[in-house]
Amino acid sequence: MKIVMLGAPGAGKGTQAKMLAAKYRIPHISTGDIFRANIKEGTELGRKAKEYMDQGQLVPDSLTLDLIMDRFSKPDCANGYVLDGFPRTIPQAEALTAALKAKGEKVDFAINVDVPDENIINRMSGRRCCLKCGGTFHVKYNPPKTEGICDFCDAELVIRDDDKPEIVKKRLVAYHDQTQPLIDYYEKEGALRNVDGTVDVEVVFDSIVKILEA
Ligand code: AMP
């Protein structure tokens, strides 16, 4: 099963993507996590990506596509995957469609986790993330068991640099300009399904599972 998660930054698509990956035993592929891992390791890719990420801008398609196509070639992708944060532009979506078509495959579901903008800024200010394992939490909506500590690997939780309010506003502009058109793209492909992302994490998850298993 190949699933694309759509939604504004902070809509909760990463949390849902991880839960889906665990339930269906398929990899969770987050381009944001891959970029952050590269930044942490000090690679050339990380250095280039950071320049854009720190400004709330998207990393250029050329860098992103090389990275993701390499990831798709790994054996754990054979039974599908949940894509979180990719595609984020129409050219990325077209590249994904073309790469899959060449193998006689397609995106099965594009799940749009719908949260209005006014909720996003509020949500982002409570977001905490683990730079060690990629775990994400929210102080109110999805709190860790121990305040400030990752449930999965016991590392300290931090506020991501690009979750600061002034950068979040820029990320929302990038989302509306470059990523929201993907909703129409996947609607035309017949893969789009909308879920209300304003309700509890478990309720959102149940509605996605119902869609996948309908
Ligand atoms: P995320 O963790 O998905 O919110 O991504 C964090 C940041 O990484 C984004 O604001 C972008 O700067 C960059 N990024 C992640 N995925 C992509 C992508 N598919 N295309 C371009 N930039 C991306």
Image: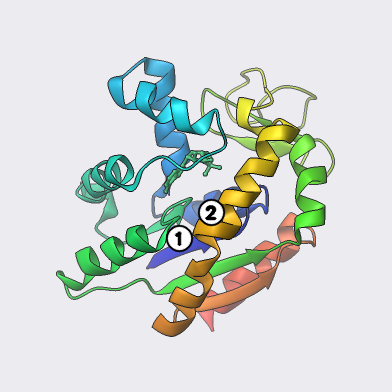
Looking at the image, residue 28 sits to the left or right of residue 160; the answer is left
Q: Position of residue 120 (x, y in %)?
A: 75, 50
> Does the rendering let one see residue 9?
no
154, 159: nearer the viewer: 159
Q: Nearer the viewer, mark 1 or mark 2?
A: 2
Q: Residue furthest top?
A: 42
Q: Position of residue 150 (x, y in %)?
A: 65, 26
Image quadrant occupied by the C terminus:
bottom right
What's the CA distance linking mark 1 and mark 2?
11 Å
Mark 2 falls on what kind of element?
helix
Q: Position of residue 81 (x, y in %)?
A: 37, 57
166, 5: nearer the viewer: 166
Figure check: 214 above or below 97? below
Mark 1 falls on what kind of element?
helix
Q: Earlier in the sequence, mark 1 or mark 2?
A: 2
Q: Position of residue 110 (x, y in %)?
A: 48, 70
Dot 1 amino acid type = Tyr
Question: Residue at horizontal 34%, vertical 58%?
Answer: 92
Dot 2 amino acid type = Ala
Figure check: 8 above or below 110? above
Residue under pointer 1:
24
Question: Residue at horizontal 33%, vertical 60%?
Answer: 91
Q: Disc number at residue 17?
A: 2
